[in-house]
Every structure is written in C-alpha cells, then in structure tokens.
Amino acid sequence: MRFLLDTEQRAFAASLDSMLASADTPSAIRSWSAGDHTRGFDLWGRIAGAGVFALAVPEAYEGLGPRPVELAVAFVELGRHAVPGPLVETVTAAALLTEPGPAKRYLPALASGETVATLATAGGYALDGDAATALFTLTDGELRLAPGHGPVRASLDPARRLTLPATGGELLRAEAHFGEALTWARLATAAQALGVGLALLDRTVAYVKQRLQFGVLIGSFQAVKHQLADAKIALEFARPLVFGAALTLDPADVAAAKVAACEAAYTTARTALQLHGAIGYTAEYDLSLWLTKARALRTAWGGPTECRETVLSGGGRRW
C-alpha cells in the first residue's frame, strides 16, 4: 500500500523544514548538551507556534487534535533536523492528561509551548528534566507531578540529558493506563527516527560526491552505491509503516513502525559512519549529532525486541 500526503500535509512539512533549516539547529543542540537551554527554548517556541504540540491536544483544550498523521509528519521534520528537547515526552504527557482537572491545567500550555513537559515511568530516568517546566512520573498507575529531580546524567546522545525524578509529588491521576500514551510515544519516536535516517542519508550522499580516494570520488565505487541503496530501501520501506500506523494507531502497527524506522535509521547511521571515515567519529563534526540520536532512539520507549513482541502478540500487554 502506498501512502501519499495531501497538499496541506506536504506544505506543513515544507514549512517546518524551511523554518528549522534556517534556525542553526547544530548550535542549539550543542548548547542544549552543555546545559544552556536558551537557543533550545527559542526553537521550542517556534515549533509550538507552528502548531506541532497542538496536534496532540484535543480542541476542547485549545489544541488542534488529536491528529496523529500530521504529528508524524511534523516529527519526521524534527528528526531530520535533530531538534533537542523532550519532544516525544511532551506528546506522551498530553496523552496521559485526560482527566478534566489536569487536562485544563496543563494541556493549553503544552499546546502553546509555554510548558515543556517530560515523563518518567516505573522509577526510571526522565529526559531533560532540568529543562522541563513540568516533570511527570507514572508509577503503579499513579500519574504525579514530581517535586524535583536529581543530578543530570550523561547519555549516549549528549543532547538527551537524563535526570531521576524525586519521589512523591502531587497526585494527578490515580488510575492512569499507559497503553494509549505508549502508542503515541512510539509513533512520535518512529517518525523522529525516520527523519534522522533521511538526514543521515542525504548528508552521506552529498559527502561521497566530494570525497576523493586514490584520485577518484568514492561515490563512484560500486560497493558504496550498494550500501547507500540498502539504506535508502530500508528508509523507504519504513516510511509507509510509520504513516500507516498513524492512521490506525493500533499498538501492533505502531510497534512495527518503530522497529522498521529505528532499525533503518540505525543501519543508515552505521553506513554514514563507515563512508565518512575518521571524521565521522569526531564530536565537532555535525554528523555526530545525528549518529548518536539514531542510536538513542532505537531503544527509546521500547527496544527492537520489546516492539517485536508487541507485534507478535497483536498489540502487547496492558499497562
């Protein structure tokens, strides 16, 4: 089955791509990694102004959604430009805040970008807790607003800063089921990974057209062409799975999309690293910002094994 975006969706993607391309996201990523969130917050406001977070918020709470297909379109572009911050976690929190009281209190601010949310489950780490203005925890079915967090810990992706939320805090929902929210988290992660993979492929294709080896452009080598073709095929196979999952929001479909997109991005990252040679390993080279993100997204909100189990079980366990 072939999924084609309509005119409005393509224009939305193009406008986000144009906005992010002019925003110097590599500088924002490096500042964010160092704990300086100024550029990242500016970028966050512009993304919110474009309506991205509103796509996950119902119209009753000043949102535009829920509109999962458009959200997937947006997150492909966010991944393509490696935008830092708890993007997926903000969408996931919106899916959990369904009770009238907490929804009225938080959802309009999430949609407008005024509130930056992150989320930790089952006593785990929260992404960018030091930047978030609302840190939620979900443990044993209780959704709480954490009173604070511990020290920042480094992760594989320097732009993904981990914090352990403090225990306790205000109870927002006593019987919060994570199933639907996890589906939204995996969908956004899959779309983001697809964008990361597409960016890595584009950058690598451009590089092999410039790099000489033995006086010949390496892009002319048959082995290089085969590697790039394999990466392209993997990404193009993942694309319809992502948008198909956005249409159904079936947990098994979304899990399959996450496996396909994240594995394609990871394969493309390995190819990009090999074809760039030693320069690909250096943190100063922008390629590294996408390489580390591809690896981190692969295990975010369920690794390949867990997602495959969800597919095989027809939807997975109830949280």
Image: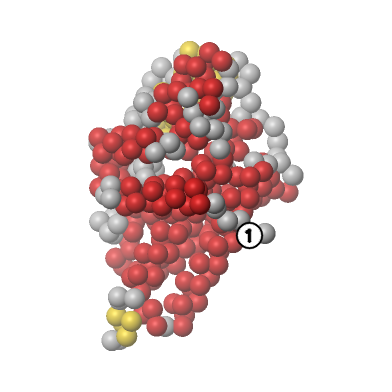
Q: How is the image coloured?
A: secondary structure
- Amino acid at the residue labelled 1: Arg
Quarter of the figure with the C terminus: top right
- Relative placement, left or right, of 140 versus 294 is right
Quarter of the figure with the N terminus: bottom right
Image coordinates for residue 140, horizontal then vertical, percent: 61, 22
Which residue is at a point 63% across and 45% down the rendered structure image?
247
- The outermost residue toward the bottom is 215
- Relative placement, left or right, of 267 versus 307 is left
| SS at mark 1 in the image | loop
Image coordinates for residue 239, horizontal then vertical, percent: 56, 56
Which residue is at a point 25% across and 56% down the rendered structure image?
284
Residue denoted by label 1: 2
Q: Nearer the viewer, residue 213 or 94?
A: 94
Residue 67 to residue 82: above or below: above
Image coordinates for residue 169, horizontal then vertical, percent: 46, 14
Q: Is residue 44 visible?
A: no
Residue 1 to residue 83: above or below: below
Image coordinates for residue 160, horizontal then vertical, percent: 38, 41
Which residue is at a point 70% across and 36% down the rendered structure image?
317
Q: Is residue 11 visible?
A: yes
Residue 64 to residue 20: above or below: above
For mark 1, does the 10 Å Cα neighbourhood hold few (<14), some (14 to 19), or many (20 or more) residues?
A: few
- The outermost residue toward the front is 7
